[in-house]
Image (tube, grey):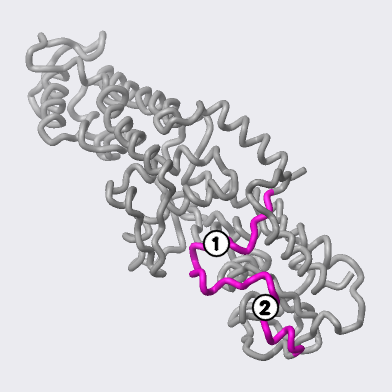
Amino acid sequence: MNIFNALKRKSDAFTLTTRATPLKRRKIGSEYVSVATSTRDMLSEKPPNFLQENSPTECTKPDRLYYFADGNIIIQSGPTLFRVHTDNLIKLGGVFEELLSLPQPDSDDAGYVDGVPLCPLFGTAPRDVRYLMAYAYGKITPKITCETQGYKLHWNSVVALLHLSHMLDLVAVRREVIDALKLVFPCGPEFTQLPPGIAGIKRKDRSLFLRTYPLQAINLFHRYNLHALMPMAYYRAAQLAISDIIDGVVSSDGNKVKIRADDVVRVLEGREQLRVSRRKVVYRWLNNFSPESEAQLPSDECLGKPSRISNETCFEYLLRMVLDFNRTGFMDSRHDALDTLPAHSDIIFQKHLCGTCYDTVTGELALGLVDNWMKLPTHFRLKEWAEIVEAQGLEDQRYED
């Protein structure tokens, strides 16, 4: 089988696929635009003119990282050539394993550069392919080990690998990407409180990135049927300013990242539900404390003795905290209903509360967060976690079959 023609047929198949076509494994056509590139950077499904004119080296350039002198195949993405080793590509599986593991003819009708076959990947962006090569050579993984935070998600590589894993049927790569995405977009009935650890973003771009990545995630999860990750994508988007949610955000490459109208409605509705649930769910245990209520013991075993630090009883301290929360709008003006008090509050509670009241307060906080997590999908008019996860499992199985 001729590599060039085989990959060309595969690429054309991607292009001809439409959303209305029932699919087992989702094929994404060349109309897809990576968040890392602009529309004008994408190739059409037709070979570039220099290939049609049998001048494969004209208007092209070797990649600065992945052009090895002993490489035995050249992958072309746009004007960029990647001279790499077929063994590394075959390990990725999918199209590469299917085609490159077969004996190749000696004829050069496929087009050769520097004496090795040239294989264009139509509809891809050079930056995305560079991330794929970095993955193939073990230079990068979707999950980055972090000494202080366990793992972080490498955002740019995940976006590139997610696109190419669908385009080239790289099932194992897709699995690894989804596993990495769950670091920032966890799913399922078990609540794990994790900060959105994301790596690979330049310091100067971070503030803008924090405004764009939730919107990018929503669009990606729609495109690649990752609906189990959608509740947390909506949650991340709900933390944005209303203007960002409605109007979108211009990213660092000059393109506006915007979500669909029905997603805007879901995010705004869920945003309000999250705001209300902070008082009614996460901090519901504080509703028992008010200046009009009689002094009461926060826990059955509390002795009601003043703290040596504040000279306040547990009830008096918690009442003061409630009044302060109400005065500052802490419970009613925010939308981060899966987050609780900052880490240092645990030390403060230990200083101002007796042991039993401390256990009661921290236990109520944890219970409120779990309850809010279980309700998270319904805040955005989605089904409950169990149904979402089951449906995602069936979708993944259809993709891999």
**Where is the C terminus found, in terms of image quarters?**
top right
Dot 1 amino acid type: Ser
Depth check, front residue: 326 or 149: 326
Identify the residue at image location x=27%, y=50%.
243
- Helix, strand or loop at mark 1: helix
Q: Quadrant of residue 28?
A: bottom right
**Percent coordinates x, y for residue 95 in the rendering:** 77, 61
Task: Verify whether residue 29 appears in magenta.
Answer: yes
Left or right position of 95 against 343: right
Residue 148 visible in image: no
Identify the residue at image location x=89%, y=69%.
1
Disc assigned to residue 308 = none
Residue 293 visible in image: yes
State which region is magenta: 26-54
What residue is disc 2 on? 82
Q: Quadrant of residue 357?
A: top left
What residue is disc 1 on? 157
Task: Verify whether residue 387 appears in magenta.
Answer: no
Depth check, front residue: 378 or 29: 29
Left or right position of 269 against 391: left
**Percent coordinates x, y for residue 175 in the rendering:** 65, 48
